[in-house]
Image (cartoon, rainbow, N blue to C red):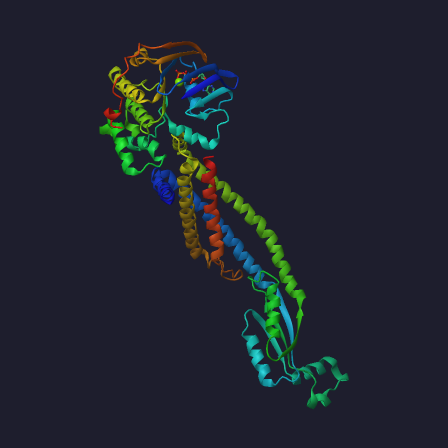
Amino acid sequence: MVTVERLSYNFGTYWALKDVSFSLKKGEFLFLTGHSGAGKTTLLRLLYGALPVTRGRASVAGYQLNNLRKRDIPQLRRKVGVVFQDFKILSDRTVFDNVAMALEVRGMPRQHLERRVRAIIRAMGLETKSYSICERLSGGEQQRVAIARSMVANPELILADEPTGNLDVDLTMHLMEIFQQFHTYGTSVIMATHSKEVLECVPGARILHLQDGRIVDEASGAEPEPEKEEPASLGEVGL
Amino acid sequence: MIGQFLRLSARGVADLRLHPFAQLLTLVAVAMVTLLTGLILLGLHTVNIELLKSRGQVEFQVYWKTDADAETVVKDWDTIRAMEHLKDFKTFTPDNALTELASTLGETGDFSWLADNNPLPYSGLVSFHVPPEAQDQGWAAGLLTQIKSLPGVDKVHYTPFQADLAQSWRTISHMVIWPVLGFLALIVSLVVHNTIKLSLMTRLDEVEILSLVGARPGYIRWPLLTGGFVQGVLGSGLGIGLLAIVHSFIAEALNFPPFLLEIRFLPPEYLLALAGAVTLVSVLSSWVAVK
Ligand SMILES: Nc1ncnc2c1ncn2[C@@H]1O[C@H](COP(=O)(O)OP(=O)(O)OP(=O)(O)O)[C@@H](O)[C@H]1O
Ligand SMILES: [Mg+2]
């Protein structure tokens, strides 16, 4: 799903990423940890084509990011759901509109779209706020809107940058369950986080530890659970 | 495909209500630029017409066939008198042509012996004002053929000098007008471009977010272009409406001695060009603003 080889990135003279290599198979869960400024966001931005790959090689969901053609960028981004650290939701639109946006750009018919949007909003516990303007939501609510938008199109890969930064423990646990449901369904996830609790939430996940732009440690999290017999489904969140 | 196209256009129009105040300001700015440009054009147009009015005339000397009978000739004269832009028409019958000739030659000539067998044809001296809309030399040439084709006319002498004078006046006025129009176009482009660009700044985050969730450039841009188009059409329409109102107040303002200047409204093709230019710039600016 993701292959990164000796990837480096500089802002002017400052090297935010140095020689990063890793790969992620379909259905894997990967955490990125590291101090603030370690380069987590920079790495994720490279992966969804918001920064150009200039040093090293990377491919995501079948797209070579080196010399990625401009018209392929929308295609790449449709395969990847991104939760941005700063949410990037439109504060003057409703929750529904923000989430629906991810499906509208794909040209999904309205009645189909509405059902999915409602389901994911419900899963985020935001059903009473569907038609609230995002500006008037709390930080945690806005964050959930951002998460809902990243998931609604059922992407192959979710890139989540501190998706639980504004949430209390209970809500964090609830949302991690949803991430895990996607994961067990076969979605690959890369999640940047500072939180120990979050790391412990996903059995079998790998953890990349970044420090000053380098990978200094790679570990696996808690022991994987025994394989489930039944094929997992997203029925629980209604997708 | 067409459905998507219509949907995106509708979204562009619907999005105009998202920031009503900003949109209103944009609209007013576009209208004001149109109004100011319109006023300058109005001035230019009036001056141009006035200057051309007093310049240029074309003169034709017309000779009728010697065998043409009086009835045909008089009919031709009437036709000429009915022609547009006629300034003056002097007519000579063979008799008074002879008298005229005699008086010009003074005592030395006595042509009374010719009176019974007058060799002179009917003739006339026609002069026309060069009208403002006579953009090309073809106008005088057209008159020439028109006069030549009259049934009794034999030949026409045409004094190109004066027509050329009118023509060169036109050339000079064009030399002045085109740079002024170019300058105006530049100003309109800059002001409208910046206005539209500013109004789109409020939507740059939307452009960014749409792109991040995988929207194609066309999907992002088309609604903005539609919005720019609507702004351009409404803004220039409003500006021209205001221009018409202003004109109705000032039309007769200078129409007293010694000016006697009637301010004429711009012809429709000028108005169309003005509105078209403003709209085009609005659309183009919406396009570049999100590059
Ligand atoms: N646009 C930029 N221009 C210059 N430097 C930048 C830019 N973006 C990031 N950086 C620098 O790159 C380094 C890595 O930033 P990055 O955002 O990837 O950190 P992070 O690991 O996501 O941190 P945090 O945990 O605080 O979100 C930082 O030192 C940051 O200052
Ligand atoms: Mg970050």
Residue B91, located in which quarter of the rendered image? bottom right
Viewer-proximal residue, B64 or A82?
A: A82
Relative height, residue A122 to residue A162 (above, below):
below
Residue B23, located in which quarter of the rendered image? top left
Q: Can you give x and y, in whole percent of width and height, for residue B83 in the image?
A: 55, 72
- Observer able to see residue A132: no
Quadrant where the N terminus of chain A sits is top left
In-image side of B42 versus A94 (left or right) = right
Q: Can you give x and y, in whole percent of width and height, for residue B280 in the image?
A: 47, 46
- Observer able to see residue B184: yes
Q: Can you give x and y, in whole percent of width and height, for residue A200 in the image?
A: 30, 11
Relative height, residue A221 to residue B54 (above, below):
above
Q: Residue at x 43, y 35 (%)?
A: B217
Q: Can you give x and y, in whole percent of width and height, for residue B254 in the image?
A: 49, 58
Query: Ligand 1 quadrant?
Result: top left
Q: Residue at x 43, y 54 (%)?
A: B244
Relative height, residue B291 to residue B92 (above, below):
above
In-image side of B79 versus A33 (left or right) = right
Viewer-proximal residue, B221 or B68?
A: B221
Viewer-proximal residue, B28 or A226?
A: A226
Quadrant where the C terminus of chain A sits is top left
